[in-house]
Amino acid sequence: SKFEEMDDAFAEANAVMAEGAPDRKRKKSAAAAAEDTSDDDSGSDDDSGSDSDDDADKDSDDDAGADSDSDSLTDVEAERAARKAAKEEAKAKKSAAKQTKDAAAPGEEHRPKDENLPRTVFVGNLPVTIKPKQLKTLFTEFGTVDSVRLRNVPVDPEGKMPRGGKVITGKFVENRKSTNAYVVFKEEKAVDAACKGMNMREVDGRHVRVDRAAAPSAKANEAVAKEKGANAGGEVAYDHTRSLFLGNLPYDVDEEDVIRLFHRSKEYPELNGSVEAVRVVRDRKTNLGKGIAFVLFRKGSDARTGLLLDGVKMGDGREVRVTRASK
């Protein structure tokens, strides 16, 4: 009926109104909370201004502290950079010094000082196993020895071991059997005695060459050699009247091989003991021979006899060329 329809519509409206009530309550609660917050904010305006000032001061202090820390950090970094630069500079200087040393002639770093040269002898063709103490003992009979320095020790270039360590442990170039040294005496008068008494003396199977370390140039010394005579000994330069030039030698030849070529000649036994000095010309970098050498004899007659060995075979069958040394 019509009334029943009205009752149903009324009931439905009440239901709808009942469902919307919680939303209205929530909206009202939110509005009240917003109003309370507004009251609190308006009541704390003065405090807010004070807090803002305090925060600003604090931020300013923090910034100042940060700036101070930044300055300190910059100083530390600058100091580190300076130390690093100094270290790199020192390393560069050390490297340059090493390159200069390596570029110098072999053994140059052990050359005696100029003021010591008049008291110094150069000793060549020593056995590579010789020790400074042993060398000092050998020369003590001619005078008090001040110092002994080995030079041109043919150490093996392979590996990272320091040069001194290689000498001590015996790591030498396989095809080099000789080395040289300087012997400095306390008194100059011992030099002449050592040159005369030790030159071409056999030490551990090798005939050592002993010369004045302070000898003049080759041309100037030629006259000195003539003046002192055949038995003067000890002169670095080669008197061309007593010298021979050898060519086509094996590259691994050393001084002792050349000396034995003449001293042990079966055809000319008179050449035994005739050699006064030998110089094998070597490459400065590799220390290997260049296939040529100069031989100084004690007498001019021995040099003339030595010319007869031209064409003699040596090493791997090479025919050695023997000619007079030019001026």
Image (tube, grey):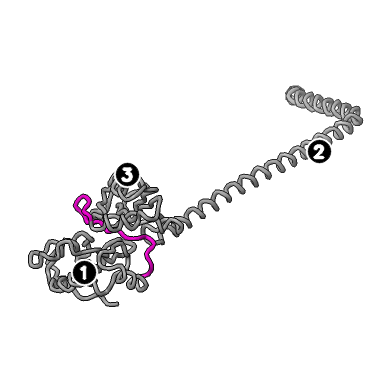
- Residue 161 percent coordinates (x, y): 35, 46
Mark 1, residue position: 299
* Mark-to-mark CA distance, 1 and 2: 101 Å
Question: For mark 1, does the 10 Å Cα neighbourhood hold few (<14), some (14 to 19), or many (20 or more) residues?
Answer: some
Task: Evaluate if marks 1 and 2 touch, with contact meaning CB atoms under 8 Å apart.
Answer: no
Badge 3: residue crowd in 10 Å (few <14, some 14–19, many ≥20): few
Q: Tell me what residue is drawn at x 38 percent, y 67 percent.
A: 216
The image shows residue 103 at horizontal and vertical percentages of 41, 61
The mark lying in front, picked from 2 and 3, is 3
Sequence-wise, the earlier of marks 1 and 3 is: 3
Marker disc for residue 133:
3
Tell me the residue that label 2 is attached to.
60
Image quarter in which the C terminus is found:
bottom left
Q: Which residues are magenta?
A: 201-217
**Which numbered tag is attached to residue 242?**
none
- Badge nearest the viewer, 1 or 2: 1
Identify the residue shown where x is 19% and y is 63%. Answer: 258
Amino acid type at image mark 3: Lys
Residue appearing at x 21%, y 49% in the figure: 204
Task: Assign the N terminus to one quadrant of the image.
Answer: top right
User: Splitting the image into 4 quarters, where does residue 257 fall?
Assistant: bottom left
